[in-house]
Image: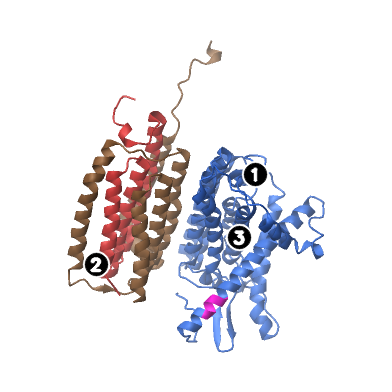
């Protein structure tokens, strides 16, 4: 069913544009803050796993550390080597960052909110093919890495860029296929419809999230493919320090490196949002309290689930060793892809048998 | 009016990308212009209402096939093109020829008076309707194309694998 | 409200640029990309006519064109890699003798 951005309220064009601009600014600023604080989370959690403190000096619990990091990146000298291919060298981090941030535009954070005479869904825009938009933008994000590796004119960067692009393209297939099971159960590609199909409980207390409702294997396939897509350990061979100097971002310094860094964490946040929407029921959770609280509780549950995901990302990174490249590619094509196809087959059979 | 402005904007990007593909001498620049053409074509499909086709164009064409091209260019370390006698002749004959043919066709198309206008988002190609067609009316081509892709995968793997090295007599056979 | 002929002219321009690229260019990968450009021009024609005649089959056919383009790109690039291994050049004018 197509969703309109107005429920029963008719908005004029200018009001619609103003509301959209406000929503876009709010979402982008929240995303950038989330990216900065997921860096903080990573440093703290990795430190605790390794039995040390992590950032503690800048602000209470080191909470102002991202500000200090940002200042450092801005003031650092921005070296541009003479041997790089300049147009692509400068464009590659911009491409990576732009595509990483754009995919947040179709992700719903909560339900309908009404403020005075206006109301809107908590989502920048709801398209019928929301899930395909996210997949498409993720596919385009490969170019940032491929072009960075190539334009640096350096064998380590080239190898790192080639390996990273081949890895991302391979795991995109099992990523997409693992989501098809969810789509068969929900019957729509719109992200809002998929979340709405997970409302309610069965047997009284188990929520009807897709992870409990039959898509557990798909959830794990999605998780593993997402780790490979965002180039995180155990699949981070293309950017590992001990392997290829620093892989595709060897020749980058200061602000351009910071853009790659932010793009990686923004991709993590997007993947975590997608996992909560598709497998963990989005913003569904117990809602209680006065009406103002009831409007904000869904967003709180959504943020809690996304935070859990990012924590899982960091936890896995600092616990598992990394795969060798041929093991990585063999795993993606020979294990994950057949499993994902089998999952689609079984889900389709069960749904067709029940209908 | 808004429809015309959007059509002209994305059409201009398409044409600029296509011409840039011809003009650039390094294949990576041509590849990037082709990606720009495909992305703006996806926007044109959205203007015609074909939302699923636009999404698949971005995912498959711009996000997978062109990545294949870019990876191959990077792998083979393709450099700038060199001018040969054949290419000079081709430019001198080919460019005027194709231009004349193109202008003739465009003039004929634009001067027909019975071409109707297409409103914005004319035929909504939502996934459900397209799937219904694909699995009912076009089932045979659908299955045949899946076999075609399987053959293409096998062919590509065999063609691109390194040539097998002939083995000499084994040591334990003396 | 854009007339159908505008879409067809745009599709024609893309196709003509593809043909030009196929004739002019000497790098085999660029020739392949011109073929992809031609296929894209044809796809635009299909979708425009589908909107004009209100027949969804036009959009479905675009899928088949994309599938064929993908298969052709995969096999074509594999052939290019195989030829590059023996001839060490990507210029089609240099691959004009059967003898290596």
Q: Which of C55 and A17 is in front in this view?
A: A17
Instruction: Quickly name the residue at label 1.
Output: A240
Instruction: Quickly name the residue at label 3.
Output: A266
Task: Sort mark 3 into few (<14), some (14-19) or many (20+) by Cα contacts within 10 Å.
Answer: many
**Secondary element at image label 1:** loop
Which quadrant of the figure contains the N terminus of chain A? bottom left
Examine the rendered structure and indicate whether residue C3 appears above or below residue C13.
below
Checking the image for residue A208, the label placed there is none
Give the magenta-colored segment's residue range. A18-22
Relative image position of residue A325 (x, y in whole percent): 58, 40
Examine the rendered structure and indicate whether residue A163 appears above or below residue A274.
above
Q: Residue at x 59, y 60 (%)?
A: A271
- Rendered red, the chain in question is C
Residues under numbered marks 3 and 2 in contact, where contact means CB atoms less than 8 Å apart: no
Q: Which residue is drawn at 67% across and 78% down?
A: A287
- Rendered blue, the chain in question is A
Q: Which chain carries label 3?
A: A
Task: Sort mark 1 into few (<14), some (14-19) or many (20+) by Cα contacts within 10 Å.
Answer: some
For residue B107, say whether it is visible: yes
**Secondary element at image label 3:** helix
Q: Are marks 2 and 1 on the same chain?
A: no
Examine the rendered structure and indicate whether residue B156 appears above or below residue C49.
above
Instruction: Residue B120: name its quadrant.
Output: bottom left
- Rendered brown, the chain in question is B
Instruction: Quickly name the residue at label 2.
Output: C5
Mark sitting earlier along the chain (3/1): 1
Residue B56 horizontal side relative to residue A161, left or right: left
Instruction: Residue B38: name its quadrant.
Output: bottom left
**Secondary element at image label 2:** helix
């Amino acid at each position: 069913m197509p969703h309109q951005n107005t429920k029963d309220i008719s908005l004029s064009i200018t009001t619609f544009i103003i509301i959209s601009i406000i929503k876009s600014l709010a979402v982008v600023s929240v995303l950038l803050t989330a990216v900065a604080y997921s860096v903080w989370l990573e440093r703290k959690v990795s430190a605790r796993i390794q039995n040390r403190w992590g950032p503690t000096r800048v602000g209470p619990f080191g909470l102002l550390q991202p500000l200090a990091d940002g200042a450092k990146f801005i003031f650092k000298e921005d070296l541009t080597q003479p041997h790089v291919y300049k147009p692509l060298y400068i464009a590659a981090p911009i491409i990576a960052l732009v595509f990483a941030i754009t995919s947040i535009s179709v992700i719903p954070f909560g339900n309908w909110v009404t403020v005075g005479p206006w109301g809107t869904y908590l989502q920048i825009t709801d398209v019928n093919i929301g899930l395909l938009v996210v997949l498409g933008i993720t596919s385009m994000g490969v170019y940032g890495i491929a072009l960075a590796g190539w334009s640096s004119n350096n064998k380590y960067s080239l190898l790192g860029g080639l390996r990273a692009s081949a890895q991302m393209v391979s795991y995109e297939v099992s990523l997409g296929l693992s989501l098809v099971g969810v789509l068969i159960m929900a019957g729509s590609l719109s992200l809002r419809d998929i979340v709405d199909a997970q409302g309610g409980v069965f047997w009284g207390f188990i929520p009807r999230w897709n992870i409990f409702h039959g898509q557990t294997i798909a959830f794990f396939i999605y998780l593993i493919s997402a780790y490979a897509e965002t180039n995180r350990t155990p699949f981070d061979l293309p950017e590992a320090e001990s392997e290829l100097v620093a892989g595709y971002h060897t020749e980058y310094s200061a602000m351009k490196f910071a853009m790659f860094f932010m793009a990686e964490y923004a991709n993590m946040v997007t993947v975590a949002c997608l996992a909560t929407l598709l497998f963990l029921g989005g913003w569904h959770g117990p809602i209680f309290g006065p009406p103002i609280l009831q409007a904000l509780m869904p967003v709180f549950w959504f943020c809690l689930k996304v935070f859990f995901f990012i924590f899982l990302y960091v936890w896995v990174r600092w616990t598992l060793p990394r795969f060798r490249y041929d093991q990585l590619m063999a795993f993606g094509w020979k294990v994950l892809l057949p499993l994902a196809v089998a999952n689609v087959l079984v889900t389709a059979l069960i749904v067709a048998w029940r209908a | 009016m808004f429809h015309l402005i959007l059509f002209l904007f994305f059409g201009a990007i398409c044409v600029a990308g296509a011409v840039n593909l011809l003009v650039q001498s390094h294949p990576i620049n041509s590849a990037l212009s082709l990606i720009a053409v495909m992305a703006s074509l996806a926007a044109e499909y959205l203007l015609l209402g074909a939302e699923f086709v636009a999404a698949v164009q971005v995912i498959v064409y711009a996000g997978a096939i062109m990545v294949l091209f870019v990876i191959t260019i990077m792998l083979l370390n393709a450099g700038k093109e060199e001018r040969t006698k054949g290419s000079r002749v081709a430019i001198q004959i080919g460019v005027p020829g194709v231009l004349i043919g193109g202008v003739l066709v465009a003039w004929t198309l634009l001067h027909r008076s019975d071409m109707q206008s297409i409103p914005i988002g004319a035929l909504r190609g939502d996934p459900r309707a397209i799937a219904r067609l694909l699995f009912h009316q076009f089932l045979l081509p659908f299955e045949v194309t899946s076999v075609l892709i399987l053959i293409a995968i096998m062919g590509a793997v065999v063609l691109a694998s390194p040539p097998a090295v002939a083995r000499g007599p084994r040591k334990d056979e003396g | 409200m854009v007339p159908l002929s505008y879409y067809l002219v745009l599709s024609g321009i893309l196709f003509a640029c593809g043909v030009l690229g196929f004739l002019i260019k000497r790098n085999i990968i660029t020739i392949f990309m011109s073929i992809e450009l031609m296929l894209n021009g044809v796809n635009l024609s299909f979708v425009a006519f589908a909107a004009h005649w209100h027949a969804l089959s036009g959009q479905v056919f675009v899928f088949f064109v994309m599938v064929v383009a993908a298969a052709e790109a995969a096999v074509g690039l594999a052939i290019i890699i195989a030829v590059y291994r023996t001839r060490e050049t990507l210029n089609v004018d240099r691959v004009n003798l059967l003898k290596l």
